Amino acid sequence: MAGEVVGTALIMNTPAADQVIVAEGLGRRYGRHTAVTGLDLKVRRGEVFGLLGSDGAGKTTTLQILAGILNPSAGRATVLGYDCVREAASLTARLGYMSQSFSLYGRLSVDENLEFFADLHRVPEPQRQARKTRLLEFARLAPHRDRPARFLSGGMQKKLALCCALIHEPELLVLDEPTTGVDPVSRREFWNILYQALTQGTTIVVSTPYMDEAERCTRVALLHEGRLIACDAPSRLRAQMPGRMLELRARPQRRALAVLEEALPRSRPYVFGDTLHLHQEESPAPAAPLPDLLAARGIAVEQIRPVAPSLEDVFVTRLAGTAPPAAPPATAEAPPVRERTGLAVEVEDLTVRFGDFTAVDRVGFSVRRGEIFGFLGPNGSGKTTTIRILCGLLAPSAGRARVAGYDVRHEPLAVKARIGYMSQRFSLYDDLTVGENLEFFAGAYGVPRARLAARRNWALALAGLEGEEGRPTRGLSGGFKQRLALACAVLHEPEVIFLDEPTAGVDPLSRRRFWELIYRLSDQGVTVFVTTHYMDEAEHCHTLGLLYNGRLIALGTPEELRAGMRAGEMLELECDQPIAALALFQDAPGIRASFFGDRLHLLVDDAEAARAQILARLQRAGHRVHHVERVPLGIEDVFIAFIEMEQARRAAEAA
Amino acid sequence: MRGLIGAVIWKEVREIRRDPVTIWVAAVLPLIMLYLFGVALSLDVKDAAFAVYDEDGSAESRALAEAFPNSGYFRRTHDIRAQREIGERLDRGQARLVLVIPEDFSAKLARGETAAVQTLVDGSFSATAMVIAGYAAAIVQDYNLAQLRRGGAPPVPVTLESRAWFNAPLKSVNYIVPGLFGVILMAFPPLLTALAVVREKEAGSVQQIFVSPIRPWQFIAGKMVPYAAIAFLEMLMILVAGLWGFGIPFRGSLALFLLATTIYVFCTVGLGLLISTVTRSQLVAMLFALILTLMPSFLFSGFLFPIFTMPEMMQWYTYLFPARYFIDISRGIVMKDVGIEILWPQFAALLAYTAAVFAAATRLFRKKVAA
């Protein structure tokens, strides 16, 4: 055939040096609201660059400007050598972009979606089929080629959207929160596709609210209220953090936390599994006074050791001045500590069917009074349905559930009088003031007139909004809104409080402060039932339940889950060229490789056995290895192992 | 590999085919509208209630009164015995027309004088009242002619015989339906396209379009073509249904009519797309579509209310809405068999309008998420 050779006219529009993105003084205003201001960024070819920040920090605006689909109101940016405003048409034709929203066509099948994006980007026919096959194989979507996109799970949709953004093999991939709300297994597969693109030379810029994803980036930028707070490699950011992080194992833990919060408020102690983490500012200071301080209050300190700060620790330190102040210590206004024995929630064989779809499948667990129960699982796994049943809003199809001692099916009114509920959207009235919101919710929940003033003051203190009653709620930051919403939900002194993704979209420091409030409530004997997408928040809970496709597939304390699941062992590898090394392990049997900042994480069955094999492979390829070390497994790895076990069980059942 | 426009067309066709709402709006609603308007929206008078106050009571007066029901337009419901009863019958709507024959009616006729009769018409619906009055006058004139002939008098040398051209039986359906073609195509296709872009904006998929080599005109054209094809099929459907179902004669050139349709469908779907590119939510887009396309095509297109009777300012205003051009063309071809030599200004206006709409939609579709 004539004209057989279709050259992929790859115009190497290489700008000065190796900068793929150069942004100077970038700013964007919407009316009077400033979304981004004074942003300077440089991204090199071959990087995975992370953009971090809470909702409203300016991540999406920044990415849209860099993708050429939003004009900045100040500054300029050059991406792939093209000016983002003047040469937007050339730019948009060359990059891959994935918006935060659903970017597929729901009525088109998996295959048709890919086909359409291949058409849009003029991918020539010979390459097209090969790329489609490869991407679908890699995303594990090949068996679903003919399924309409709207019938895919959330995780599959995100993977497909990524495949669509990669079909023209762009030099630069810009991803806006691609994994929010996606289950951990899909999330891992999603990152595997990204690594694949990375090893082929694609530069990736990705925004994320998850700190563990930030750890996978070569460099990260932290945005807060439109400003760049920090920008560097994760390891460098960790090294630059003043002072150090200490891990403290003390009994009783709760008392230790209260003492530390009171005596060393600037150390911002927080619960991490069965330990406490705290920040010590003056770096070489001895850890000695700490045990003395605690011992004087009758607390037994079992162990103190320095630990590497997480990225979140780093950001919390950097953001310290911007978030709401730590909640004031419990005062006389606080409600009396409740009875802490007995069960607050008992669930047996709970099943909910909608038509022939089983949303919740024979779920059973119980929660002690005063316990913090973390309910985890991807979108659509049945979390919200379960909460609705426990709140008496929905009758179960089978099984039974008791909340605060009352049956949800037969005594829903008694249940409702004893529970509090806070939804993901902080159901506050934006047009009312802080005080008016409190008054409204007090009325709605029937707080007795005599208690009203005391509860109101208590709630204002809890939210950190004393003296701000007259402020319109609309103007509050996300962190304050979240605390006000919690205060409203507990005004009527409920025994059990349900928090449905209370920390979604809130910056790390506000999140951590919010957890302090949750501990305080728990101390007062309030049972806290909380759902979250953040796997790291799982560490803050006493007990965890992992829901997957309506089934409770794991239940226990974080430690129990870690110990009880053979999820494998993790090796951390530092070498000269981590991206090239990653390619080496991408299809190695028995090894799951992921990128971790400037290092690699290799998940293997047996670390000792695999170590030699890994080193040999690296040496053969001529890599210089700095060190290989076993590191503890993250809770997410444990969850993935549980989910994979469940998937295997289902596959066996189906067979 | 499809071209860029082809890619959008290919995608749209698949999406439309799988969307039951689109198929309803495109296929079923136009037929329902055609049926409802063709049947209900008739200005014709048939079997109108008619009462007689015959003070004369002669053979002549009875013959005159009989002529009314005999015409087929009136149904005699009451014989009125007293003067005051007349008002009552009209007030209650029991009679649309009252014929009053004075007691000296036959006497005057016998003397060869002119005898006056009175018809009282319920004028609450002015359009029907005029039709009724017209029929009454025609019946009376027929009666006169018959009288003259019977009396052996020489035929009246000149009588006025008016005939309604293009619509000899003066059936309103004959001009309502060709107008409806214009209205229906302005009602449903823009509604579909008004949602076509804004739906992608709401879902977020349009951002993927922004980040692709496609140019605005290619995207708009790709969206336009499949909907224009749907609208064209819609026209064929209502054309067949209208001509057969209502037995309307098609006098002019079908080819010319289809040419006009082709231009018009691009115009109407283009208007919808224009609305879709400037709005941000489906709700707003639908409201705009109703206000900018459906309403004016009812009110200011000459579909129901003749433009030449409007105040001059409003007459100018009607030029803003393309339905008026198409309805002129449609009635011209279907009813009068006029050709391009008469209709060219309307064709030119329609063509210019369509081009302007396309240009505006292309210009306003910017590949940016915010201004």
Image (cartoon, grey):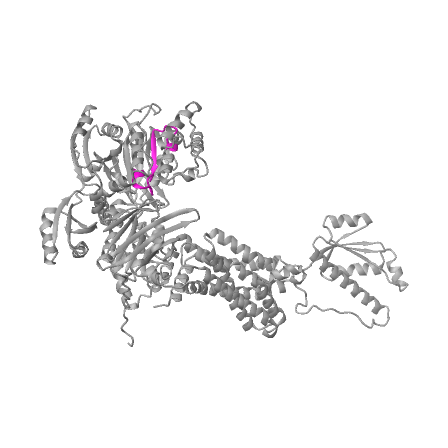
Q: State the residue lying farthest toward the right.
A: B111
The picture quadrant where one finds residue B12 is bottom left
The picture quadrant where one finds residue B341 is bottom right
Viewer-side residue, B60 vs B37: B37
Asked if residue A146 shows in the view, the reply is no
Viewer-side residue, B300 vs A28: A28
Q: Where the C terminus of chain B falls, by quadrant?
A: bottom left
Q: Where the N terminus of chain B falls, by quadrant?
A: bottom left
* Drawn side of residue A46 relative to residue B252, left or right: left
On the image, the x and y values in percent for residue A51 come to 29, 49
On the image, the x and y values in percent for residue A69 come to 38, 57
- Number of numbered discs on residues: 0
User: Magenta stretch containing residue A500, yes or no?
Assistant: yes
* Drawn side of residue B14 relative to residue B307, left or right: left
The picture quadrant where one finds residue B47 is bottom right
On the image, the x and y values in percent for residue A342 come to 28, 27
